[in-house]
Image (cartoon, helix red, strand yellow):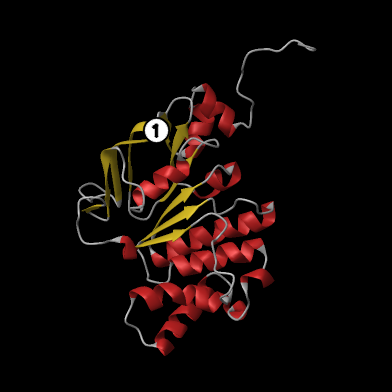
Amino acid sequence: MSGVAPIIDATGLRQAFGSRVIFSDVSFTVQAGEVFAILGGSGCGKSVLMRQMIGLLPPLAGSVRVLGQDMYAGAADIRTRIGVMFQAGALFGSMTLLENVMLPLELLSDLPYAARVAVARVKLGLVGLADSAGKMPSEISGGMAKRAAIARAMALDPPLLLLDEPSAGLDPITSAGLDRLILELRDELGITVVVVTHELASILAIADRCLMLDASAGGVIAQGDPRLLAAECAHPTVRAFFHREAVAGPSRTRGA
């Protein structure tokens, strides 16, 4: 919508570790209510970019504005307004699912115990785990662990949810169910979702727009509707990604 500030506004981002440049001149916006995917092959900097967006890794150049505030300019801390699900869920193995979801409320809210329990039960219900509140992470499947991690990320009712590789390691049926959950949460709660992924099926199923990073290019090689990129983009790496093709390289002689 014209005149409405984006939820995320990243401009000219650069990151390197020593002499190794991960990416440079990365710019993009994420609009309210979108499911926005950050994609690309292994080692292209997807998770690095996510850490920049949530305030864990200051960029060497450029700026990140999230929910109208500069993430690194000393403004009021907005991290409580961003829900994050890290890779593999990162649940605490010594806590029940209910206790895992309650943790952000215990650390960052003034709610009394009974209210924290009630909120955590509601969040578990939203992800289909209402009957599993008392289970330990070791007692549930990988798909359930991802759902519990999403419930914990939503504990403080953030308007922005970032999911790092939510479908990684899941079978196709479980992955499709998680994709459906992400869309339901976006539609029912009116939140904005950023998904870091390389799972092609999930990208095409849920993303309104995407940004594609490439390690060899050292930055962004494509942005837009992933379905249009799959159908129309002429960049060889983009086409290879969306059509599951090997990128052409130097030929090898048998026995060499």
Left or right of residue 170: residue 50: left
Residue occupying the point 47% across, 50% down? 195
Would you say residue 125 is visible in this rendering? no
Q: Nearer the viewer, residue 176 or 43?
A: 43
Identify which residue is drawn at 56% across, 55% down. 179
In the depicted structure, whether residue 232 falls above or below residue 193: above
**On screen, residue 234 above or below 108:** above
Position in image of residue 231 (x %, y %): 53, 30
In this rendering, does residue 119 appear at all? yes
Circle 1 is placed at which residue position?
A: 18
Most foreground residue, 186 or 105: 105
Q: Residue most toward the right? A: 255
Query: Which amino acid lies under the numbered mark 1 shown in the image of this protein?
Result: Gly
Percent of width and height locating residue 40:
51, 36
Q: How many residues crowd around disc 1 within 10 Å: few (fewer than 14), some, or many (20 or more)?
A: few
SS label for mark 1 = loop
Pick the quarter of the image with the C terminus: top right
Position of residue 191 in the picture relative to residue 90 (left or right): left
Q: Is residue 254 above or below residue 36?
A: above
Residue 188 pos. (x, y %): 44, 66
Query: Whole-percent x and y of residue 182?
Result: 50, 59
Count of numbered circles on the image? 1
Q: Is residue 38 left or right of residue 139?
A: left
Q: Nearer the viewer, residue 199 or 60?
A: 60
176 relative to 132, above or below: above
The residue depicted at 60 percent of the width and 23 percent of the height is 247
